[in-house]
Image: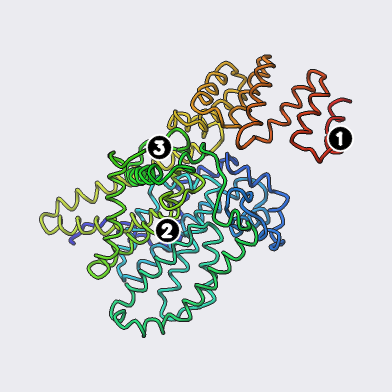
């Protein structure tokens, strides 16, 4: 290939170990997040400090849902990792961000190691890992503390797959890594069908003899089944039958939660095409896609759904078509498809309609396929004329530099809730959640007129978001419009998913008017069996 480095081999000239190199890149891209606070969903970590601060109490952590039963999530390994953070790095968010960045770097390294072991191609492996680590859509996972579950699921999945491709498999490690992956986040289950594709790739000379193949992988299969059954048994025990598979969420988080397949599938496929576009063209990256930012579609006759169908079918076909012709593409398609299915909303609704963090695991597949395409283009151009190859190389470098700037800028958005909410208000101007959160920014700044305007926009889009209604009540209280404040607190408490803070706000408002009777009445409605606690609570405000 002459004197021109291929895109992936640009890093080969460095003498640093590959793991250290990828970690340094991760810190360059997301090191600014070390100055970040706990924001948005991170509050769950702070709220559960009393439990997470004792990671040695493993039994208690493994008996907890994530964060409550209704959301239908069971992620004990993620909770345990927070506890270990508290133990060794203290309560500061710096330690949590540090671990996230470190995990991100090692994920890129283990991806490189897996691909190099499987395909014995240094350039391809290095290029795929390089493309992966620079994708700006990962900013939500790397810069946000609660991206930890995504990081751990992929981290342990890669360790599981690396163990699988070894000549001598350690059955204990194999099962443990798979369990840790699924118990970090449910999408870790994608490692199972990916593993099947890897076995076919690895055993390409012998998979015609199914009996020999089954004999060779009998014990690894038993190890995998044991790990999987262990997780789902614990999940059933902790969440119970009602939330073992089912979830409870409002249409604010997922507008298609109650939709029929005629609406859910075309909307999900359109969202898929949006994901793929934003992975490669990181324009208008956003922390929020909830109601009403993504329109609910009623048919497939739209560009987004059609593009989604093409992408979905292409992924299925390429797994089968390239399994012998180019196993690298087959593997990439498997990573993409099988990691996407659990978060797709196609077969069953999940807790949200969309989120950039959800594409963290599937993006591995697109990075793998992209690396194959880049190498093929490069080899074709250099066979024609060296100058064309040089141009293609520097175009790749320019894209990487551009991706880097976008990633750094996005990580800055996650430094504080104010930055995040302002950013979300700009990129998701039709979202009830973003408008409500932006209203709180103005509220805490004392800009009550601006807060009222933004929060009324949110309510006009959807008047059933209880936290937004509560926020509007707070604004009217500060503005001295007490009847309006009471009205919105009341609406918040009567919503499908009432915001608990509205109970205290309502009672405090009545107490501010020396109306002890109504303060007690509202508390009794929501806490009918807590008479003594209510008396104690009211006494501290009536002394």
Q: Residue at x 59, y 18 (%)?
A: 447
From the image, tell me which residue sits under label 3: 296
From the viewer's side, name the closer residue of 411 and 428: 428
From the image, tell me which residue sits under label 2: 108
- In the depicted structure, whether residue 263 falls above or below residue 168: above
Residue at the outermost top position: 480
Q: Is residue 21 left or right of residue 420?
A: left
Q: Position of residue 95 (x, y in %)?
A: 60, 50
Q: Position of residue 337 (x, y in %)?
A: 36, 57
User: Of helix, strand and loop, which one carries label 1?
Assistant: helix
User: Of helix, strand and loop, which one carries label 2?
Assistant: helix
Mark 1 or 3: in front is 3
Please name the colour scheme applied to the rendered image: rainbow
- In the depicted structure, whether residue 280 falls above or below residue 337: above
Quarter of the image containing the N terminus? bottom left
Q: Residues within 10 Å of mark 1 (few under 14, many from 20)?
A: few
From the image, tell me which residue sits under label 1: 536
Q: Position of residue 14 (x, y in %)?
A: 36, 59
Q: Quadrant of residue 485?
A: top right
User: Of helix, strand and loop, which one carries label 3?
Assistant: loop
Q: Residue at x 71, y 28 (%)?
A: 505
Q: Position of residue 65 (x, y in %)?
A: 63, 54
Q: CA distance from mark 2 to mark 1?
A: 54 Å
Q: CA distance from mark 3 to mark 2?
A: 35 Å
Q: Residue at x 25, y 70 (%)?
A: 324
- Whether residue 403 appears in this view of the structure is no
Q: Earlier in the sequence, mark 1 or mark 3?
A: 3
């Amino acid at each position: 290939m002459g004197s021109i480095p291929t895109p992936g081999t640009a890093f080969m000239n460095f003498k640093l170990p590959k793991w250290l190199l990828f970690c340094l890149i991760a810190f360059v891209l997301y090191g600014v997040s070390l100055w970040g606070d706990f924001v948005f969903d991170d509050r769950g970590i702070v709220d559960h400090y009393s439990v997470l601060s004792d990671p040695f109490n493993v039994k208690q952590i493994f008996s907890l849902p994530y964060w409550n039963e209704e959301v239908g999530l069971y992620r004990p390994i993620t909770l345990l990792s927070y506890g270990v953070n508290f133990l060794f790095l203290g309560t500061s968010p710096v330690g949590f961000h540090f671990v996230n960045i470190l995990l991100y770097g090692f994920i890129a390294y283990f991806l490189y190691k897996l691909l190099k072991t499987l395909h014995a191609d240094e350039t391809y492996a290095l290029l795929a890992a390089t493309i992966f680590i620079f994708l700006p859509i990962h900013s939500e996972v790397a810069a946000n503390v609660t991206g930890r579950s995504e990081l751990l699921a992929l981290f342990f999945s890669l360790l599981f797959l690396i163990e699988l491709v070894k000549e001598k498999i350690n059955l204990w490690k194999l099962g443990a890594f798979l369990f840790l992956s699924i118990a970090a986040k449910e999408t870790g289950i994608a490692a199972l069908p990916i593993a099947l594709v890897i076995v076919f790739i690895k055993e390409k000379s012998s998979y015609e003899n199914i009996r020999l193949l089954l004999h060779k992988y009998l014990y690894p299969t038993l190890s995998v089944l044991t790990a999987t059954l262990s997780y789902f048994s614990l999940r059933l025990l902790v969440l119970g039958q009602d939330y073992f598979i089912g979830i409870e969420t409002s249409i604010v988080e997922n507008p298609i939660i109650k939709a029929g397949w005629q609406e859910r599938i075309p909307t999900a496929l359109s969202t898929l095409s949006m994901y793929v576009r934003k992975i490669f063209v990181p324009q208008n990256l956003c922390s929020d896609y909830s109601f009403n930012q993504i329109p609910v579609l009623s048919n497939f006759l739209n560009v987004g759904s059609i593009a989604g169908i093409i992408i979905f079918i292409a992924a299925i076909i390429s797994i089968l078509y390239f399994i012998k012709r180019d196993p690298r593409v087959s593997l990439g398609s498997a990573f993409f498809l099988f990691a996407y299915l659990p978060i797709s909303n196609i077969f069953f609704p999940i807790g949200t309609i969309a989120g950039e963090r959800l594409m963290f695991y599937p993006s591995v597949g697109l990075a793998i396929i992209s690396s194959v395409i880049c190498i093929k283009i490069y080899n074709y151009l250099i066979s024609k004329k060296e100058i064309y190859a040089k141009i293609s190389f520097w175009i790749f470098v320019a894209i990487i530099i551009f991706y880097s700037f976008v990633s750094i800028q996005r990580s800055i958005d996650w430094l504080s809730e104010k930055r995040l909410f302002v950013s979300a208000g700009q990129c998701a101007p039709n979202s009830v959640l973003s408008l409500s959160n932006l209203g709180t920014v103005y509220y805490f700044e004392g800009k009550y007129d601006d807060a009222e305007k933004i929060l009324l926009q949110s309510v006009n889009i959807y008047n059933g978001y209880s936290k937004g209604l509560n926020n509007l009540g707070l604004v009217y209280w500060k503005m001295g419009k007490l009847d309006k404040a009471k009205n919105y607190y009341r609406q918040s408490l009567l919503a499908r998913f009432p915001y608990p803070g509205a109970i205290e706000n309502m009672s405090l408002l009545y107490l501010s008017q020396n109306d002890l009777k109504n303060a007690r009445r509202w508390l009794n409605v929501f806490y009918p069996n807590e008479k003594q606690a209510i008396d104690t609570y009211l006494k501290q405000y009536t002394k």
